[in-house]
Amino acid sequence: MNRWSRKFRRIGLAIGCVAIISALGVTCPPPFGPRFVDIELVNLTDFDVDPRIFIHPVSEVPFEELFRPENELIVDPLLLPGEEAIFTFRCQDVGTIGSDFALMFITPILAIESDNGPVVDEGIDFFCGDIVSFVFIDDGIEFYTSVEVNGVIIID
């Protein structure tokens, strides 16, 4: 078998593998593109916040699967007033991200729960290479969580 024949066979095999993987619905990060997702937590309140962020590797996972202790992003110490924190994850580790009703601590033992618990999914709300920001806001009337992707508000 000559050299060109082997090359064409390898190319055909590679194309066939990609076609099979695509047909199965498996998503893979691009070989030369971004391979990480940044999760940014921003506290715009005057109080400490426990963001209660949960991350699951599967997109569109049911709530009961997402909000399990093993999926929680532990933020210790809590987010201080005006503080930002950024966490970087491999794309294959981030399918669904949610805040399970963040807590704003008025005193060390008295907390107010966020009015909402936003959840975002990879491939729908964000993609590999994006910055997903959970912004905790107290406007004097309500405490809630806003979500931005690359600086664009998607949940308010």
Image (spheres, rainbow, N blue to C red):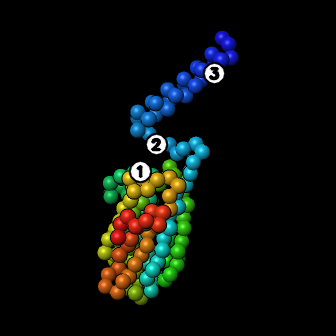
According to the picture, the residue beneath numbered tag 3 turns out to be: 7
User: Residue 143, image x and y in percent?
Assistant: 35, 79
Q: Is residue 145 above or below residue 2?
A: below
- Please identify the quadrant where the N terminus is shown: top right
CA gap, disc 1 and disc 3: 34 Å
Q: What is the secondary structure assignment of the residue under circle 1? A: loop
Of labels 1 and 3, earlier in sequence is 3
Q: Residues within 10 Å of mark 2 (few under 14, many from 20)?
A: few
Q: What is the secondary structure assignment of the residue under circle 3? A: helix
Q: Is residue 92 left or right of residue 10?
A: left
CA gap, disc 2 and disc 3: 26 Å
Outermost right residue: 3
Residue drawn 54% across and 67% down? 86
Find residue 27 and name its label.
2
Find residue 115 and name its label.
none
The reply to whether dot 2 and dot 1 touch (C-beta < 8 Å) is yes
Q: Is residue 139 left or right of residue 89?
A: left
**Residue type pointed to by label 2:** Thr
Q: Residues within 10 Å of mark 1 (few under 14, many from 20)?
A: few
- Please identify the quadrant where the C terminus is shown: bottom left
According to the picture, the residue beneath numbered tag 1 turns out to be: 123
Q: Is residue 38 above or below residue 91?
A: below
**Residue type pointed to by label 3:** Lys
